[in-house]
Image: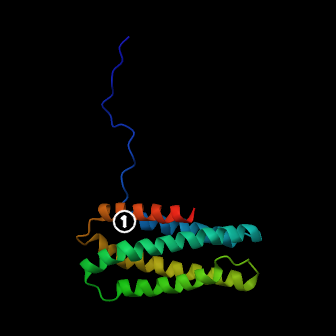
Amino acid sequence: MTTTKTTGPAKAKPAPKDAIALLKADHAAVSQMFAKYERTRSTAQKKALVAELCTALTVHAQIEEEIFYPAVKAVLKDKLLVPEATVEHASVKDLIGQLKGVEPDGEMYDAKVKVLSEYVKHHVEEEQTEMFTKAKASSVDMIDLGARMAARKDELLAQVA
């Protein structure tokens, strides 16, 4: 009995995501976490979701600030988009600091999560409608940028685990 080799591709790693696809996937994941938080009544589940949200948002902001924003700012020569996004990150980080490691204690905790959700939603909308559109049209190699961001994200998540 003879076997024939197939000439199809071997099981390889999935094609690397471009930077914008990676960021949009993060945005979608965080949005789902916020929606799940709103439906949750269990204090333990709220605490776990907030811990997951804080990690996801912290890592996301860090890869944007370290890799994505500098690349975009360099090619767009935009004097407002990246600085505004950085200021928005500072507000998000402040709320994360107020929530991290704190027990869900009712109204104020829920209010902070709600405001965090609103800040993030606003930030995501601006990125996706303004910054990403301009970045896509630029000369930035989004595949290379995405690969660097994915590697850094993995590195940061490994430090948390």
The total of numbered circles placed on residues is 1
Location of the N terminus (image quadrant):
top left
Q: Residue at x 40, y 87 (%)?
A: 84
Q: Answer with the quarter of the image where residue 96 lies.
A: bottom right
Q: Which residue appears farthest toward the top when viewing the image? A: 1
Pinpoint residue 95: horizontal percent, then vertical percent.
Answer: 59, 84
Pick the residue in front: 89 or 62.
62
By what rule are the colours in the image chosen?
rainbow
Location of the C terminus (image quadrant):
bottom right
Instruction: Name which residue type carries label 1.
Output: Ala
Binning the other alpha carbons within 10 Å of mark 1 as few (below 14), some (14 to 19) or many (20 upward) gives many
Q: Answer with the quarter of the image where residue 48 lies.
A: bottom right
Pinpoint residue 149: horizontal percent, then vertical percent.
Answer: 39, 65
**Residue 43 against residue 89 in the figure, above or below:** above
Q: Residue at x 63, y 70 (%)?
A: 51
Q: Secondary structure at mark 1?
A: helix
Q: Which residue appears farthest toward the left when viewing the image? A: 139
Left-right relation of 9 to 45: left
Q: Residue at x 45, y 88 (%)?
A: 87
Say which residue label 1 marks. 19
Pinpoint residue 33: horizontal percent, then vertical percent.
Answer: 60, 68
Pick the residue in front: 114 or 53.
53
Q: Which residue appears farthest toward the front when viewing the image? A: 159
Q: Answer with the quarter of the image where residue 49 lies.
A: bottom right
Left-right relation of 80 to 121: left
Pinpoint residue 77: horizontal percent, then vertical percent.
Answer: 25, 84
Q: Residue at x 53, y 73 (%)?
A: 57
